Image (tube, rainbow, N blue to C red):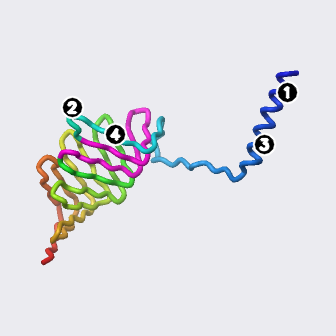
Amino acid sequence: MGRSFELFLLILTFFLLISFNKGLSFKKISYPQNFHPQVIIEKVEYSVYKRENLEWKLKAKEIWQNIKGDLWGREILLINVKKGVRIKGKEGFYFARRNEFLLRKGVILKTQDNRTVSTEELKFFPDRGIVVSNKKVIVKEKRMVMKGRGFIYFVDTGDLRIKEKANVKLKF
């Protein structure tokens, strides 16, 4: 009789919790198709060291990892501490096997010489120190605005090249 009473109390507690928490809502989980996350981490800050020197920082609102080790996240910020380069996007992927970042939606690259590069999607290859895009791009400096399609940026040298349809406006 003791076990059945415990079971009754458990069921009663369950129904009471449900009746008192009718307004209870759960966070809707939405992630990219075919990603299937295994681990979810919120408010992430991750540092990458090279030969005991801080090289890059990654900050994100949340990061989801799948079984392959790939990551998907929201509100991504990558910072090259030595060069002062910052890459920000509303969402992004990290493909572990290729060591490649893909940032999307409202992506902004802030270069070491204070140029602002805006696009909707870019790829970053940390091993090679290269940032590339094939999407429309707007580059802003103090007295110049440049528009085009696609770019390549070399983190080590600060060299930025627009791939095609470059249009420059100078402000005096």
Three-letter residue code for mark 1 = Phe
Closest to the camera, between mark 1 and mark 2, is: 2
Between 151 and 127, the one lying in front of the other is 127
Relative to residue 16, is residue 66 drawn left or right?
left
Q: Report which residue position mark 2 lands on.
A: 52
Q: Report which residue position mark 1 lands on.
A: 5
The local secondary structure at tag 2 comes to loop
Q: Report which residue position mark 4 lands on.
A: 46
- Whether 69 is among the magenta residues is yes
Marks 1/3 in contact by CB < 8 Å: the verdict is: no
Picture residue at 21% right of the left edge, 67% below the top: 147
Using the numbered discs, state the Cα–Cα distance from disc 1 to disc 3 in whole angstroms.
Answer: 16 Å
Q: Report which residue position mark 3 lands on.
A: 16
Picture residue at 13% right of the left edge, 52% below the top: 158
Three-letter residue code for mark 2 = Glu
Which callout, 2 or 4, points at the residue further toward the start of the chain? 4
Which callout, 1 or 3, points at the residue further toward the start of the chain? 1
